[in-house]
Amino acid sequence: MTNKNPTFHGAEPSWANACVGNNGQPSYVEYSEGFSKAANILIDLVIKDRSIHLSVDEFVYPVCFNMRHSVELRLKGAIDELIEIAKFKNINIQFNSSGSHDINIIWSFFKTQSENIDKRYIAANQKAETTILDIAEVDPTGQTFRYPISNDSQKHLTDISVINFILLKEKFNELEKDLDSLHKLNRWLHSEYNQGSFTEKLSRPEIFKIAKALPRVEKWRDAEFTTIKDHIKAEYRLGSRDFSKAVDIIKKHYNLAPLINAPLPLRGISEEKLLHFIDIWFKENPDFRKDRDKPYTEMKFDRTSMLARLIARSAPQNQTWDLFNTEVDAEYLAGIETLFYFARDREFVEYYDRLYESQLAQANSTLAHNANLKDDFMHIFSKSNAIDNFLISLFALHHIGLAERIIGTYGLEGAFKWLDDARSGRLFSYPDFASY
């Protein structure tokens, strides 16, 4: 163990101790935030002071250095994020972040590589590029605002003369917003590509557009299909194999298969069995509508009555289970669990299949150690929001007819605040930059 540095170490008060190194695990993004905030604080202080006590002539150097360095770090962080996205497409990107400090080089690398991976980067890059290039022109390597003289003994900033703090704040804050949008795009695309709904030549939204352009599957033997197919291949520069890969994804995708009139069935449970579950659930919950209108009241804990409540609850649960025990197998249980938890998690629709496989494995494991699936089944059946979640999942999976049938059968029109959003797709909408 090394001796404690007399300057850089922890002390009291504890709130003043900053976590660094392995105690903080900061990335380029976290590092950049500190420099960015420092620049903004200094800018605001100088502007408020109107350069009376805090001279713009003195503060311009630490302000611009912090600004420039935060941008360098943000771009390096963006490259790290892009490297992870590229892996989904089996593209190997390598960049020496620790040895690269020239913003021109860093930006050019990110811009070229990102737009090669996904066209959605083009618009995001265009917004940030102008100010990034301004910074790169004045201080490409981080020396201009650190030292008055260059390595070649040349005085810095002789071509500029004055820098306005008000304009500086405006341009920097605008760039920060653009870089934030770029960061959000990186995070979104990482999640999106992780779903696997893309090909070597087509992104997820491009496959969505192709699905919308295709005719219903029963017309695929008609001349119309051949015409549309040839148009799509020409527009996206696809060979026959590339087109087939897109079609395979469309056929297996819960959002896309209905567009070609080939909807996918629910996993693990048939519509008839789901309707039977819902019918019994409503019979066991006759005050469903009334209970939804009641204000929430906290349950008081009464240890003496807990046992009585548990005993009272076990009898109706046994009666309910008797109605289902002959039909509930691992697939059935996984089916209703997946419908319930998929709505709770609100992930990409591809998550539905992964969640089902996970729930099915868990159900089979339960069967291997227990005689039946009663406890897990009753856990879902006893949920007060079971119908909410089932309907949300059905809308998300494009089983809209079944969802509307349930709503009509049980008089649920107006019972859910989210219903209009589910019908319109707003519950499952994507960010503007996804262009779906």
Image: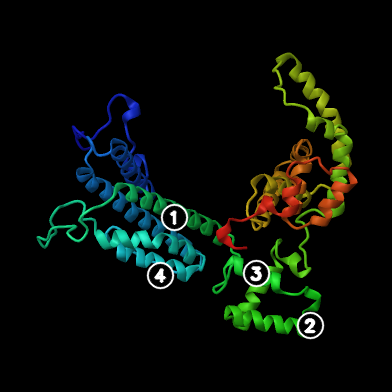
Q: Position of residue 51 (x, y in %)?
A: 24, 39
Give the label, 3 or 1, closer to the camera: 1
**How many residues crowd mark 1 within 10 Å: few (<14), some (14–19), many (20+)?**
some
With 366 as the anchor, is 11 left or right in this view?
left
Distance between the alpha carbons at the discs numbered 2 and 3: 21 Å
Q: Residue at x 31, y 44 (%)?
A: 39
Q: SS at mark 4?
A: helix
Say whether disc 3 or disc 4 marks the residue closer to the N-terminus.
4
**Amino acid at pointer 3:** Lys
With 64 as the anchor, is 107 left or right in this view?
right
What residue sits right under mark 4 in the picture? 112
What residue sits right under mark 2 in the picture? 221
Distance between the alpha carbons at the discs numbered 4 and 1: 18 Å
Instruction: Determine if residue 140 is in view.
Output: no
Q: SS at mark 3?
A: helix
Distance between the alpha carbons at the discs numbered 1 and 2: 48 Å
Res. 266 image quadrant: bottom right
What residue sits right under mark 1 in the picture? 178
Q: SS at mark 2?
A: loop
Distance between the alpha carbons at the discs numbered 4 and 2: 41 Å
**How many residues crowd mark 3 within 10 Å: few (<14), some (14–19), many (20+)?**
some
Give the label, 2 or 3, closer to the camera: 3
Distance between the alpha carbons at the discs numbered 3 and 1: 27 Å
Q: Position of residue 89 (x, y in %)?
A: 50, 68
What residue sits right under mark 3 in the picture? 209
> In terms of depth relative to the viewer, which is nearer, 389 or 177?
177
Say whether disc 2 or disc 3 marks the residue closer to the N-terminus.
3
**Amino acid at pointer 1:** Asp
Q: SS at mark 1?
A: helix
- 166 up-or-down from 209: above or below: above
With 247 as the anchor, is 116 left or right in this view?
left
